[in-house]
Image (cartoon, rainbow, N blue to C red):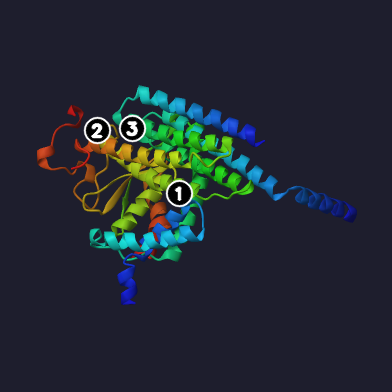
Amino acid sequence: MIDIAIKVAFVAVSLAQVLAMIRLVKGPSIGDRILALDTMVVNAIALIVLLGLWGGTQLYFEAALIFAMLGFVSTVAYCRFVLRGDIIE
Amino acid sequence: MRVLSRILPHPLLSLILAVVWCLLVNSLSLGTVVLSLILAVLIPLLTEAYWPDRPDPPRLGRLTLYVLLVIWDIALANIAVAWIVLTRPNAKMRSRWVVIPLDLKTPEAIAILAGTITLTPGTVSADLSNGGSCLLVHALDTGDAEDEAKGIKQRYERRLKEIFE
Amino acid sequence: MIEDLIAMEDAFIGWLTALEPVKIADIATVVALYAGAFFAFVGSVGLLKLDTPMKRLHAPTKASTLGVGSLLLASMIQAFAHGSGSVHEVLIMAFLFVTAPISANFISKVNLHREDADPTPPPPGDSAWATFDTHPADDRTPKEV
């Protein structure tokens, strides 16, 4: 029962990742591209969590946490660069 | 009392540090707890100089109730937005800007209000006016901007005012 | 009539006792997994389907965050049901829920700054919105950047 649910979730999240990638390529505005990248990071965390569930291990926890932190910082850095022309003033 | 506030300049920060350390290690053994307590005392002491004007502590009980309310709203309202996104064509969405005049003055309270507005689906807080007197919110699908602003003020801002001011 | 009720009660008690804690946890895991998959997917569908940059901001910031939250919940329930309990997923969940509004706010500021959004109404109390309140030396048309 759980195996099927995990497989369905894998498929759904991977499809979500592909859709976000299409938006990343299409754009058209910079805000859309940043948003698409942010969504892809969140979906990547979802995939890592699913991988951990599938293998029944806690090993991937740190990877997911670091992805969450890096994703947030890079989104903010990119936005600040567009807004101010500089990241650290 | 003075000695205690000398050792623990930020009781709330200390509590959060201890809890986060225990969560990171993912255990509640004696060693972890002792190390978390050491960190909870040391880090606020060492970084005290960097926190010149610290806000007054919020009312914790009410803050917890508020967080529970927001989580409940997130879960319920996400279903509504999923329905709008999946079924309603773009042309029929009445998305517009909503301006919310603020009664809150504390920056922390305004930040939490903006975060709440973004997390409760249908609205994203976009900007603050340069004097801090109102909040610019984008609504995905709303009939009446006035009603939306009134609803948010009634449901969230009133509670935050009780918590922080 | 009464015999029917008693029979129903027996059936219900039998059903309850057949549900061991582990089984209930498994059902909860499956529900959380499906919910998480659904919301993560809806977030991306919204990202692709909606037509203006500000509208697009709505779907992924909230639905995707809730989706990952649900998947983490599933992972936590599963860890508690089978041996070692684990709560550190709460950390990722809290981090995502705290940072999602900040990212969304920054992206909408980018949209405002690049004039990719509808014209904004003027703020009633103050002179301008913070994003447009720049130093005169920084003035230039956004599309030049």
- Numbered disc 2: what chain? C
Q: In this view, does C1 lie to the left or right of A52?
A: right
Separation (CA) of disc 1 from disc 3: 24 Å
Residue C74 in picture, x, y percent from top left: 57, 43
Quadrant of the rendered structure where residue A27 is?
top left
Separation (CA) of disc 3 from disc 2: 13 Å
Q: Which residue is drawn at 34% across and 77% down?
A: B1
Q: Which residue is drawn at 49% across and 39% down?
A: A60
Give the mark, 1 or 2, whose residue is nearer the N terminus.
1
In the rendered image, which quarter contains the C terminus of chain B?
bottom left
Q: Mark 2 points at which residue?
A: C114
> Which label is found at residue A34?
3
Which amino acid type corresponds to the residue marked 1 in the rendered image?
Answer: Leu
Q: In this view, does C117 lie to the left or right of A57?
A: left
Q: Which of marks 1 and 3 is in front?
A: 1
Residue C99 in picture, x, y percent from top left: 37, 45
State yes or no: discs 1 and 2 in contact (Cβ < 8 Å): no
**Which residue reaches farthest left?**
C137
Do callouts 1 and 2 point to residues on the same chain? Answer: yes
Q: Name the residue under label 1.
A: C91
Q: Which residue is drawn at 51% across and 51% down?
A: B72
Q: Nearer the viewer, mark 3 or mark 2?
A: 3
Which amino acid type corresponds to the residue marked 2 in the rendered image?
Answer: Arg
Secondary structure of the residue carrying tag 1 is helix
- Numbered disc 3: what chain? A
Residue C80, compared with residue A37, is above or below; it is: below
Nearer to us in this view, B34 or A62: B34
Nearer to us in this view, C25 or B42: B42
